[in-house]
Image (spheres, rainbow, N blue to C red):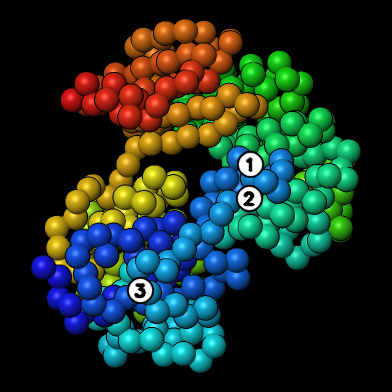
Amino acid sequence: MPDGNRRVVVVGDSVAGVTALRELRALGHTGPVALIAADPDGCYPRPPLSKKALVDAAGDPEGWSLADLEVDVTRSAAVGLDSERRIVHTEGGHSVHYDALVLATGARARRLAPEREGEFVVRTMRDATALRERLSAASSVAVIGAGFLGLEVAGAAHRRGLPVTVVDTEPPLMRMLGPFLSEAVAARLRAASVDVVRATSPAVPSGDPIEGITVDGVDIRADVVVSCVGEVPNCEWLSGTALADPRGIAVDERCATSVPDVFAAGDVTHRRGADGTRGRNPFWSHAVAQAKVAAAGALGLEPRCAPHDDYFWTDILGAPVKIVGPLPLVGEPTRIAGSLEDASAVLEWDHEDGRRTVVAFGAKKAVGWLRRRAADAE
């Protein structure tokens, strides 16, 4: 059983932070648990922000309640860590003591023109609300970045009947899904008259306030410019602790950091492999898995799951796309059932290492079914 006197502090009310709190209690910890959080809107799931909230306020995610967890909540940003004395200092002047610490401060949206007005991003409830209000009065939209987030934003604008231009230096979702599915996504965008521009150099917002983008020397006018170009880990407050670098907080397979009794999970982390490799996995499913492992580590227990979960989902112009298995996808699929053109297909890739990736492209398949299909290869 966990030490009932052990005080565990979680920094960050991200999905990783909230999952860590719930896992601490699920693992039987009855001792003190504290949360240090800075989001003024509280704890809420972020995937709906780009999938639903941009279309209608009814899609705003409901906040998570922590009432059943007996958590001491400090609503103030963490600004410093004294790992020798085991104290987290906050912007409001609080000094929060811990026996074990879980860092889950997430990341913020990367901006291309932070010094200028008019660049929209989607990372927080306030970001989504501001963009939704602007879209209601817009006549054209330009999205920089053709990844999951960029295409979800483009889809929200398209549903409003707005002309949309998506710009990237690579085809849509090429980095994640590989050429076969990238072409299927591009075909769906073309059929819906979403303009996809392949640039030879990164696009940049133009004007101040921003009134469009410049792509390979050509100006594209747009009422609304949305940058979907990645994220920046929220770890500057750890400066001087040797815990973080520009890539985030390095963790191992147990989500442990280089400091004793300090663990980290979610978008603020990058993986530190035993072979020296480094990698980031800024996805919701990984954040949940890491948080569970970090919570177990904070209690000195064995985790109940692996620190990663190869499950991804998005929406491409109304077609839900669910993926279970490793990415990216190389070459042609091993099997196809249904129709890609009608957005009702199930595709499978068998990898050389024996693993399998299963994709439901518009097809109505439960996640459990996809997981079982992927597991059949093991």
Residues at circles 3 and 1 in contact by the CB criterion of under 8 Å: no
User: Residue at coordinates 28% horizontally, 79% vertically from top-left?
Assistant: 32
Q: Earlier in the sequence, mark 1 or mark 2?
A: 1
Image coordinates for residue 180, horizontal then vertical, percent: 49, 17
Q: Earlier in the sequence, mark 3 or mark 2?
A: 2
Identify whether 362 is placed above or below 223.
above
Q: Nearer the viewer, mark 3 or mark 1?
A: 3
Residues at circles 1 and 2 in contact by the CB criterion of under 8 Å: yes
Question: How many residues crowd around disc 2 within 10 Å: few (fewer than 14), some, or many (20 or more)?
Answer: many
Q: Earlier in the sequence, mark 3 or mark 1?
A: 1
User: Residue at coordinates 79% horizontally, 62% vertically from top-left?
Assistant: 116
Q: Secondary structure at mark 2?
A: loop
Image quadrant where residue 119 sits: bottom right
Three-letter amino acid code of the residue under disc 1: Lys
Label 3: which residue? 70
Three-letter amino acid code of the residue under disc 3: Glu
Residues at circles 3 and 2 in contact by the CB criterion of under 8 Å: no
Image-based side of 196 in relation to 350, left or right: right
User: Residue at coordinates 14% horizontally, 63% vertically from top-left?
Assistant: 301
Image-based side of 235 in relation to 172, left or right: left
- Distance of label 3 from label 1 (alpha carbons): 31 Å
User: Residue at coordinates 53% horizontally, 80% vertically from top-left?
Assistant: 76
Label 1: which residue? 52
Looking at the picture, tell me which residue is in the foreground, 231 or 266.
266
Label 2: which residue? 60
